[in-house]
Image (spheres, rainbow, N blue to C red):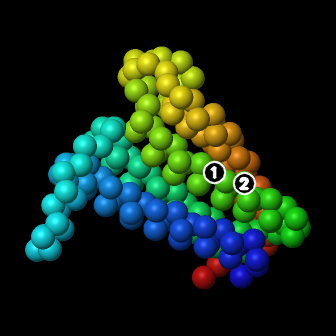
Amino acid sequence: MTHAARNLLIQGLLVLTAGLLLGFVYMVFLVGALDLRPLPLNIQITMPGTEHGWRTAHVGSLLNGVFAVALAFALDKAVLTPRARAWAARLVVFAIWVNVGFYILANFAPNRALSWNANQYGDASFAGMIAFAPAVIGTMTAVVGVVMILIGVLRGRTGIEES
């Protein structure tokens, strides 16, 4: 496995881990407590956000991790220069981590961090702005990274193989 693909794989697995941990946060939000019975630990917690927001943080982060893991293996099949391979991996890594941050911060934004301004979900806020701006850039970098990998994979095509 190339260095760039290995790095993308590692970052994808780290984002999967973040998604699993966010599942725990989602559970705490739903229950309203950190309840670790049979241990004598039950701490009531009031968390910001919505059920939808924390579920999205959990599932979205898991999907971003799977996305990166899949692309790591595709990247190794791509015919790209080492520099292009490294850039494609970096662009995707940036996007997946920005998305994790977006999912979390969106729970602190009345407008779900879906725009700079107020929208149908609520008013604009600082949390919304610092989540929205990098997410827009991350979306673009993900598309560029995927297209780079796609072009590299198409370059490596030698024709249709019969089985």
Residue 143 visible somewhere in the drawing: no
Q: Secondary structure at mark 1?
A: helix
Q: Residue 28: percent from the left, percent from the top?
A: 25, 54
Q: Is residue 26 above or below residue 81?
A: above
Residue 60 visible somewhere in the drawing: yes
| Amino acid carrying mark 1 in the image | Ala
Q: In the rendered structure, find residue 95 and report the number of the disc placed on it.
A: 1
Q: Secondary structure at mark 2?
A: helix
Q: In the rendered structure, find residue 91 and report the number of the disc placed on it.
A: 2
Marks 2 and 1: in contact by CB < 8 Å? yes
Residue at 39 percent across and 64 percent down: it is: 20
* Left or right for 43, reference 134: left
Looking at this view, is 34 or 8 the one in front?
34
Residue at 84 percent across and 66 percent down: it is: 80
Looking at this view, is 152 or 107 the one in front?
107
Badge 2, how many Cα within 10 Å: few under 14, some, many 20+? many
* Left or right for 150, reference 128: right
Q: CA distance from mark 1 to mark 2?
A: 6 Å
Q: Is residue 49 above or below residue 158?
A: above
* Left or right for 150, reference 44: right
Residue at 76 percent across and 77 percent down: it is: 3
Residue at 62 percent across and 72 percent down: it is: 9
Q: In the rendered structure, find residue 63 and report the number of the disc placed on it.
A: none
Q: Quadrant of the C terminus?
A: bottom right
| Amino acid carrying mark 2 in the image | Leu
* Left or right for 20, reference 97: left
Q: Is residue 22 above or below residue 13?
A: above
Badge 1, how many Cα within 10 Å: few under 14, some, many 20+? many
Q: Residue 46: percent from the left, percent from the top?
A: 25, 43
Q: Residue 17: percent from the left, percent from the top?
A: 46, 68
